[in-house]
Amino acid sequence: MSTRLNLLLGLLLVISALSLINSQYQARRLFIEIERAQTLSQQYEIEWTQLKLDQSTFGKHARIEAVASKELGMVHVTPDRTQYLSAEVVK
């Protein structure tokens, strides 16, 4: 009877040890996954800040006006260039 009890306790000890090893492995794997997610989050935060800065730079009126005049050849509207169209109402 004592031998069976010792074998049972030994088996329970081995199962407990294997369970501990498995849980430590899972904890390490999850910790690494959390670290990667935090690093990715920081990279996204930096990229978001850069995009907001670019948006504020490219959205300024002076920049838009400069690009419109240089790249597109647009000029300001003057009264002598304005054309008015009149429509006749037919009854």
Image (cartoon, rainbow, N blue to C red):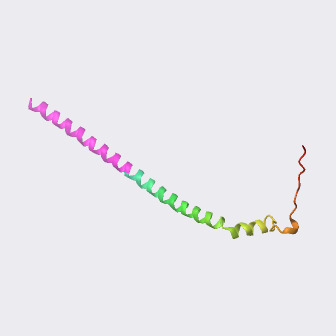
In x, y percent, where is residue 62? 70, 70
Q: Considering the image in quadrants, where does the N terminus appear? A: top left
Residue 4 lies in the magenta stretch? yes
Residue at screen point 52% across, 58% down: 44
Residue 13 lies in the magenta stretch? yes
Residue at screen point 66% across, 65% down: 58
Nearest the viewer among 30 and 8 is 30
In x, y percent, where is residue 43? 51, 59
Residue found at the very far front of the displayed protein: 91
Residue at screen point 71% across, 66% down: 64
Question: Looking at the image, how many numbered discs can be counted on the residues?
Answer: 0
Nearest the viewer among 50 and 1 is 50
Q: Which residues are magenta?
A: 1-30
Left or right: 15 with respect to 1? right
- Image quadrant assignment for residue 11: top left
Q: Considering the image in quadrants, where does the C terminus appear? A: top right
Residue found at the very far left of the displayed protein: 2
- Image quadrant assignment for residue 75: bottom right
- Image quadrant assignment for residue 86: bottom right
In x, y percent, where is residue 19? 27, 41
Task: Kindly report the secondary structure that dominates the magenta region of the rendered protein.
Answer: helix
Residue at screen point 9% across, 32% down: 2
Nearest the viewer among 84 and 41 is 84
In x, y percent, where is residue 66? 74, 69
